[in-house]
Image (cartoon, helix red, strand yellow):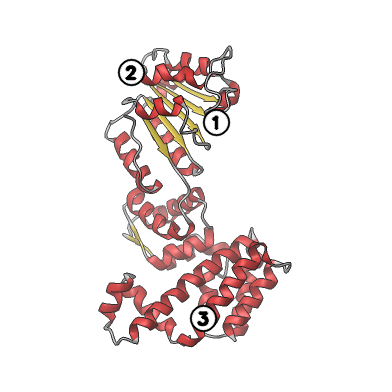
Amino acid sequence: MAKRIKTDSQQLFINLIKDIGDGKILPVYFLCGDEQFFTDQIQDKLTGLVPPESRDFNFDLLYGQDVDPAKILDVARSYPMMGDKRLVIVREFFQSTNKNINPDEEQQENSGGSLDSFIPYFERPSKETVLVMHDFKKPNKNTRFYKALLNSQECGYFEFDSPPEHSIVEWISDWVRTKHNKEIERPAAEMLYQIVGTNLHKLSTELEKLATFHKSAEQISVKDVKSVVGFSREYTAFDLQNALFARNARKTMFIAEQILQSADNETGEILRIIALLHSSFTNIWQYNRLAKKNLSPSDIDAQMKVGNYRLKMIARDATSFRMDELPLVFEALLDADRSIKGFSKLDSKAIFVMMLKRILA
């Protein structure tokens, strides 16, 4: 049966890259989902199976709108020339057929074949070819095409969805560790996320720069991120948060203005800041709740699981807000989030400023 590991996209990606590197190659790969970063990386890794000097003969990059199933199968069944393997990558795969991916339309026939044309190939694929089919859309799981793909021992079916925004910082840490054999301080990863956003391609590019500029360093610091990545933006969401926690209204508003002026997407930037503040205030609330029980720092960390360094920062920030103030803070954050997402006629900047003033009140 085809491999279909139910795990998060990052771990699935790591496992698949390792298998390819170890020579565990399948004749057929079906890659789908909305996160192109993972699928691009896998296709690049598979391209390495064909030596550069023979790619003119043994590597075919096809696009679904330009070919039909019959053409794809014809190329896949062709023998390699002057090499052991032939690699065939089909992007936008579902455009290769006029057949709707619909369980009620199983028997459509056309001169170029239908999705069902691939079923015999899934059962007995060419051993000399690696066929990679990619599409952002996922196949209808009621079709014979999908079932044949999943039931074949020779095929691998892999779904890659974008990681949720709250897990991006963990993704950064994992990527630095697995790709560059380095560590990154948690505050540095958070700062990078605030500067770059959630685009994995952009994040991986910036991490490549950081790893290159600091080859000898085992750990990437906040200073490194500021010097290599943050040069184009004087202020970050962390600067804003620090000013807010210091209850410095003038500085908070000034930094907010600077951040919005340099933002590519004002609304997206504000939503990221709201998410950061919500996470930070949640930590403050949890720390204050546990501290009231007279627990030691080690006992508090055992429950919060944030690490000693991060716990000290949270303890420092917790002195700025009393427990009875936090419900009003969360209310301000929730109202701003809802308003920006369409529950208010105010522009996003006005909503953001109003939120900051309510937190500072």
Q: Which image quarter: residue 318?
A: bottom left
Query: Looking at numbered disc 3 in the image, what kind of residue is underneath it?
Result: Pro
Spatial distance from mark 3 to mark 2, Cα to Cα? Answer: 63 Å
Query: Looking at numbered disc 2 in the image, what kind of residue is underneath it?
Result: Lys
Sooner in the amino-acid sequence: mark 2 or mark 1: 1
Query: Looking at numbered disc 1 in the image, what kind of residue is underneath it?
Result: Glu
SS class of the residue under badge 3? helix
For the C terminus, the quadrant is: bottom right
Spatial distance from mark 2 to mark 1, Cα to Cα? Answer: 24 Å
The percent coordinates of residue 310 (x first, y second) are 36, 73
Q: Residue at x 49, y 60 (%)?
A: 193
Q: Residue at x 34, y 38 (%)?
A: 16
Q: Which residue is mark 1?
A: 92
Q: Which residue is mark 3?
A: 327
SS class of the residue under badge 1? loop
The percent coordinates of residue 114 (x first, y second) are 53, 19
Sooner in the amino-acid sequence: mark 3 or mark 1: 1
In this view of the protein, which residue sits in the foreground, 82 or 263?
Answer: 263
Q: Is residue 204 above or below residue 238?
A: above
For the N terminus, the quadrant is: top left
Q: Residue at x 43, y 17 (%)?
A: 76
Q: Which residue is mark 2?
A: 127
